[in-house]
Every structure is written in C-alpha cells, then in structure tokens.
Image (cartoon, rainbow, N blue to C red):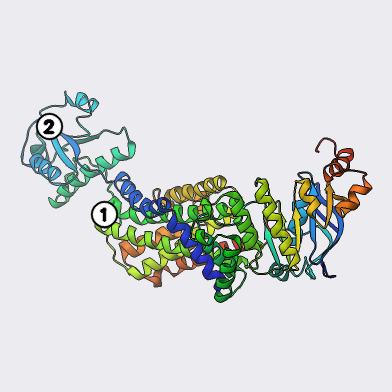
Amino acid sequence: MNGTIAIQAQELTRIFGSFTAVNRITLDVHGGEIFGFLGANGAGKTTAMRMFTGLLAPSSGTARVAGHDVYTKSEAIKRSIGYMSQKFSLYEDLTIRENIRLYGGVYGLRAQEIRSRSEEMLSRLGMEASADLQVRSLPLGWRQKLSFSVALLHRPQIVFLDEPTGGVDPITRRQFWEMIYQTAAAGTTVLVTTHYMDEAEYCDRISIMVAGKIGAMGTPAELKQHYAADSMDEVFVRLVRPTNGEAA
Amino acid sequence: MNALRGLLQKEWRHIMRDRRTLAVIILMPVVQVILFGFAIRTDVRDIRLVVVDPTPDHVTLEIRHRLEATDAFHTVAVLPNSEKLDGLFQRGQAEEAVVFEPQFASRLERGLPARVDVIADATEPNTGSTRQNYAMAVIRQYQQEQGEPAPGVQISAQLRTRFDPTAESSHLFVPGLMAFVLTIISALMTAISLTREKETGTMEALLVSPLRPWQIIIGKVLPYLAIGFVSVVLVIIEARIVFEVPLRGSVVLLLLEGLLYILVSLSLGMLISSRTSSQRVAMMGAMIGTMLPTMLLSGFIFPIESMPTVLQGVSNVIPAKWFVTIARSIMLKGIGLSYLWQETLILCGMAAALLVLSTRSFHTRLE
C-alpha cells in the first residue's frame, strides 16, 4: 500500500429498470492494495466492477478511478486500468504471441515495447515453447494466467479481476494468487471478485456485498473477529443468510 | 494507428483460419448465382407444341414453319382434328396447341375470317400466358408481313415487351442476384463476427480498452469489405462467362457501386448485431432483415411497378432496390454516373446513416 487512493466511490448506484443492482455503495480502495469483492451471485459485484471500468454508466453517486471521474473521464480511466472479465477475453483462434501483440497494440504500446514485454511475459509464465500455439489448445489454467498477464501488459495502475479463478484447479489457483501478490507488490492495485472464501483470506481487505449493498468491509481478521467466526466461510454465511435467506 | 492495424490483422486471421467459413463466403455467391440464374426463368423454351391442321395449305405451313424455327417451340405432333388434344394435354405430352380452322388459306383469300386457336397448358398461369404470347407473336408477325390486314385471324394484341432485346431472363436476374448474394454474405458475416465477440467475451475486453468505437467498427468493416469485393468480381466474371450477361457500361463504376452496396449491407449487419448479443438471434435477424426484403421488394424478382403503392413506398428504404437499378442500368443499358447519381447518392446516405447509427449504439458502454 502506497498511501494513494486508487478507487473512491460514494453512494454509487446502478438501477436496471425497477431493479437496483448496486445500491449506494461507498468505499475506498488504496493504491497497491488487494481488495476482495465478495457476494452471492447477483449481489452486484460485477455491476459495481463494470461501473469502475467504464463499461457501465452509474445511475447516481460519484466515483473516481485512478483519480479520474467515471462520468467524464472514462477514456483516461481506460488507459490506466487492466481488466480480466468473467468470460475468457483472449482470442482462441490466435496464438499466444498474436494475442499479446494485439492487446499491446490496442493499448497503444510501441512495437519495440510489445516485443520486449511479450518475451519477458512468456519466460515468466514458462510459455516460450507454446508461444505460437493457438490459445484454444491451452488448458484452462494456462489461459487464465495468460489472460491476467495480458491485462497487465500496459502496466495499469489498477487491475480488475472478475472471478479469475472460476473452474481452475487448486494448484493453478495457488499459482494465480502468487501472481496477484507479485502484482500488488509491484504497486498495482488489484480488485478481485471471487466465490472462494479461502481466497478471501488472501486479500488485504474485503467487502461483502448483500443485495446490492455493502454488508461488511474490513480486513479478513477484523471481519472474523466482528462476527465471532473461525473462517470467512462462516462470516459470509452469517452475513448473507439473515437478509437474503432464499438467495443464499 | 497501431491499434487499428492490429485489429485488422486479427480479423483477417479469424477469417483465414476458419477455412470452411471462408470457402462458404467465397463460393456461396458463385453457386447461388448459378442455381438462381438457371432456376429463375420467365422465358420459356422447348414448348411441346401440337398443331391441329385439318387442311394444310401455304398459310398454315408457313406459320407452322415459323413456330418451329424459334427456340421456343418444337412440334411434337400434327393432327388432322382436335379429338386427341385433351388427352395429350392431360398426359403432359402437349404444352401448347395451335388449332387452325379448315380451309384456312382459302377463307382468308375470300376475305372471310379465318380462326386460329392458341391453347396453352396454364397449370402455371404465368408460364401459360407466356407460351400463348410466344405463339401469338409469331402469328402476328406473319400477318404484318403480309401487309394486308387479315381481319379474321383472331389474335389478341398481347406481346411481351422487354427492354432486353434478346428476352433472356438471366440478363435481368443476374444483376439482381448480385445484390441478393452480397447482402446475405455481408450482413450475415459482420453480424455473426460481432456477436461472436460478444458471446466469447472478447468484445468486453475491446470495450474496456482505450479503443474508440469507430476503430472497432472499421476493424470489422474493412476485412469483410475486401471479401465482399472478391465476391463481386467473381459474380461479374461468372455473369459474363456463364450467362453471357452483357456489360455495356463501365466496369470500374460497377465495381465501385458494388463496394458501396457492400458497405451498406455490412453496416446493416452491424446495426443488427448491436441490438443482440447472441449469434443465433443475429443470424436470424440478418436473414430476415435483409434476405426477404431484398428478394421481395428490390425488384429483383417482382417488378416494383406492379406492387401496391404502399409497398412501392416501402421498397424505397430497401438498399437493394437502388443497387439493383444501378447494376441493371450499368450492365444492360450501359449508362454512367451522370444518370445514376441519384441512386448512388441514396446508397451513400444509407451507408453513412447506418454507420453512424451502429457506432452510436456501440458507444463504449455495454448495456
């Protein structure tokens, strides 16, 4: 953590028709922090994340991402963030190298930068030998790691990870979290949504969303203490069940 | 610029790596033109003709000879009376009959009415009347050449009048087919490729990037414009070689107009796909939204002049109508831009409007 504020949201709200997906959330995410976004399916995590990334306009409230206002400076925001969506975001019929080159170009990197960064990335991931294979032939774990690395290619200040480890085996998940730690240690803010409560423990701070609102926020230790629970699992269940019994 | 080049490269790789789809896009127009070109014919050939001529004389023989001399007829039987005629029609051995009155020539010479009946199998009404018209045209021409009016030869004055002097229906259809085929591939391909990116999630990655909507749109339009252009060239070559459709006007103009029309169709495909996020819906939308209007309302098969006024009005918003007019005019009439600038301008306007609309609806936000 480096004392700056990466994301600042105040009373941020998004309404779809008669459904309030995100209901007046207020939070600060510090620079270099690993911030976990938890919640049941449909609790509003992805909607909130989409507002931060500029994919979705807020209905009301304010938010600043990397110091830029989400209403007026979405172009500046887009240049300073990386995003890994819930769906896989690489092109399956392109090779690893072609995907890297494409996204490098999309983010305005020079050919020289793309070349050096992709070589560095490939050796870090141990994928040099597979660089010219089409992505469709890679196992899911590889793809997710690659996807994450590509989201970091332009060295963003903040990276958003929407359920990055869904469906991935435990070993790859562990490796993935090592990558997240390295990223945060290098000063990049990480905002990650997840369903896995053990992963919540890895975060510096977490917020648990319940029906569009922030039900609880703090470090994992604080939350466990507050709810007198042994694990994040218990915290989550206690928080979600009383208000949202049928959906939990 | 680097970004745009990357996008174009990426799209090109998608197309080139999907060989099967590529083959379909390139070959479909060629095959369709052949199928439609041969299947849709309004002119009739090799009509099985039965002549009933009780008393052959120089007039009936001359008319029979002239009927036989056209491509349209071949005489399957000459009968002395009409008794067997019904049976022949029922068995399909006769498609048309020309029945002369007895003493045909001598009645004419004596100034009496001489009757000739032209009977056609009208199971398909249009074909039936076309067959009748052919025979009548031959008889009438004979009559005119005789110089003197032969009042009794009862012939209605219906004649097929077509611009096309050779009356080849493929000449009229091929330009229309070009429009039809180009619409389908252009609209369908862009619609599918855009919605595929939405389905796989890569569209989200592009939208969250600093790319501008117009860059994403151009990255999609240009590659398919190139492919569409290849199809136009192939179809024109095919039209020349297989159907011997004349190309009386400027080839360059025709190609440019073709390119413009592809742009319109592509933009339409894009607009359709901006309204949906599933490939299946986009495919149906592109099919129904472009194929049917192009087929029914462009004048490709059914002449616009004979539609109800309301439909004539509707046909004005169908891009294919304008392109069909342009393509026919260039190929068959050989006229240039000085006559076609209005149609061209309308297509330009449609392209601009559709592109702006689809860029708008794309506008950086997902929902």
Q: Label 1 vs label 2: CA separation? A: 32 Å
Residue type pointed to by label 1: Phe
Say whether residue B279 is left or right of residue B110.
Answer: right
Q: Quadrant of residue B197?
A: bottom right
Contact, mark 1 vs mark 2 (Cβ under 8 Å): no
Image position, residue A219 (x, y; %)? 87, 55
Residue to which mark 1 is pinned:
B243
Image position, residue B6 (x, y; %)? 53, 68
SS type, badge 1: loop
Residue type pointed to by label 2: Ala
Mark 1 burial class by Cα count in 10 Å: few <14, some 14-19, many 20+: some
SS type, badge 2: strand
Residue to which mark 2 is pinned:
B77
Residue at the location (31% across, 64% down)?
Answer: B333
The label shown at residue B205 is none
Residue at the location (61% across, 72% down)?
Answer: A108
In this rendering, is residue A215 above or below A185?
A: above
Q: Earlier in the sequence, mark 1 or mark 2?
A: 2
Q: Residue B271 or A239: which is nearer the viewer?
A: A239
Q: Is residue A207 visible?
A: yes
Q: Quadrant of the N terminus of chain A?
A: bottom right
